[in-house]
Amino acid sequence: MVAYNRILMAVPYRYADEDTIAHAVTVAKEHGAQLTLFGVVEEIEKEYENWLTTKLPQDLEHEMYETQLAALQQRAADLKASYDKVDCAVAKGIPFVEIIKQVKAGGHDLLIMDAATRHPGRKRFMGSTTKHVLRKCPCPVLCIREQTKPGKVAAAVDVFADKPGAAELNQKVLTYAHDLAQREGAQLHVVYAQQPIGEPMLSAWGIGSADMLDGMEADLIASAETKLLKLTEDVCGSADGIVLQTVLGNPRDALPQYVRDNQIELLTMGTVCRTGIKGFLIGNTAESILNEVTCSVLALKPDGFVSTVE
């Protein structure tokens, strides 16, 4: 069973989305966790200083800090009427840096971010701050795009991944997804996307038979389905009531399509990194998927990840 003890919710300076805050409070209540509302006041860039005619930059930053702090203190006080384990904090600096520093300093084991777009036709899921946080935050990051109770939760796994820590990350992704599905009473989908074996690859191997291609792909899918079943039984105890699906296609296209076709409301996935050393590169596939999906996402790092943010 997944348990959170300290949850941080990043609250943008210009607004505090009430639905997202309510969702964060619900998650905190379920786990009996401390919830911290956290805001960041960005420093005024030097290029803009000449435009400030009535206030010095440091005075304006201080005023913005006090305004943000007062707003969050009032919001925390209001929330205490229904849940008393709520506090708040504000920092000045670069948002993603201060968010991650707060995660580390406060020992937070879940970060919640609002990823709901407020501009028709515009995607804001992978904005600059969100992208940096997903790359460098050491704890799980829950990016909320839909505040409704999820009816379908999906776990994206790679059953053939052979990099160090890959098997453990698969288990972690499925563990968190299974826990979420049980808590929400949602249907769980465990999905693996298999890159097709194309004709250029066959030619490079000196193989030219289309029948052989079909046979190889059939064997590959059968092997993936066996691995998917074993992973699910190992983590969840049983695959009863769980949808296991191997889809043929490039993961960066096939997974978002699966999410859309099956009306998945929350996707749990791992992000590619080098375990045990400083530094993290979000994989091109993971970033492409995050750019394309329109549902909420829980992004997880392998155990042993070390953030470069000090």
Image (cartoon, rainbow, N blue to C red):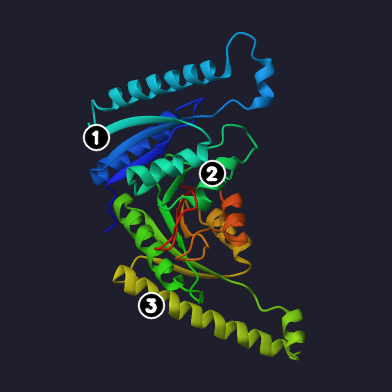
Dot 2 surroundings within 10 Å: few (below 14), some, or many (20 or more)? some
Between 279 and 255, the one lying in front of the other is: 279
SS class, disc 3: helix
- Residue 289 horizontal side relative to residue 165, left or right: right
- Rounded to the nearest whole Å, what is the CA distance between mark 3 and mark 2? 34 Å
Q: Amino acid at mark 1?
A: Lys
**Which tag, 1 or 2, sits closer to the chain's start?**
1
Q: Which residue is mark 3?
A: 230
Q: Position of residue 137 (x, y in %)?
A: 46, 50
Mark-to-mark CA distance, 1 and 2 = 26 Å
The residue at 53%/52% (across/down) is 135
The x and y percentages for residue 32 are 23, 43
Q: Are marks 1 and 3 in contact (CB under 8 Å)?
A: no
Q: Earlier in the sequence, mark 3 or mark 2?
A: 2
Residue type of the residue flagged with mark 2: Thr
Q: Which residue is mark 2?
A: 130
Task: Estimate how packed mark 3 is, as few (under 14), some (14 to 19) or many (20 or more) residues with alpha carbons within 10 Å.
Answer: some
Specify few, some or many for label 1: CA neighbours under 10 Å numbering under 14, 14-19, or 20 or more.
some
Q: Determine if residue 84 is in view.
A: yes
Residue with the mark numbered 1? 85
Q: Is residue 262 above or below residue 44?
A: below
Element at label 2:
helix
Residue located 52% across and 63% down the image: 273
Q: Amino acid at mark 3?
A: Lys
In this view, 111 is above or below 83: below
Point out the tag, 1 or 3, that comes first from the N-terminus. Answer: 1
Quadrant of image for the N terminus: bottom left
Dot 1: element: loop
| Distance CA(mark 1)–CA(mark 3) | 40 Å
Q: Check contact, mark 3 vs mark 2: CB within 8 A.
A: no
Q: Quadrant of residue 288?
A: bottom right
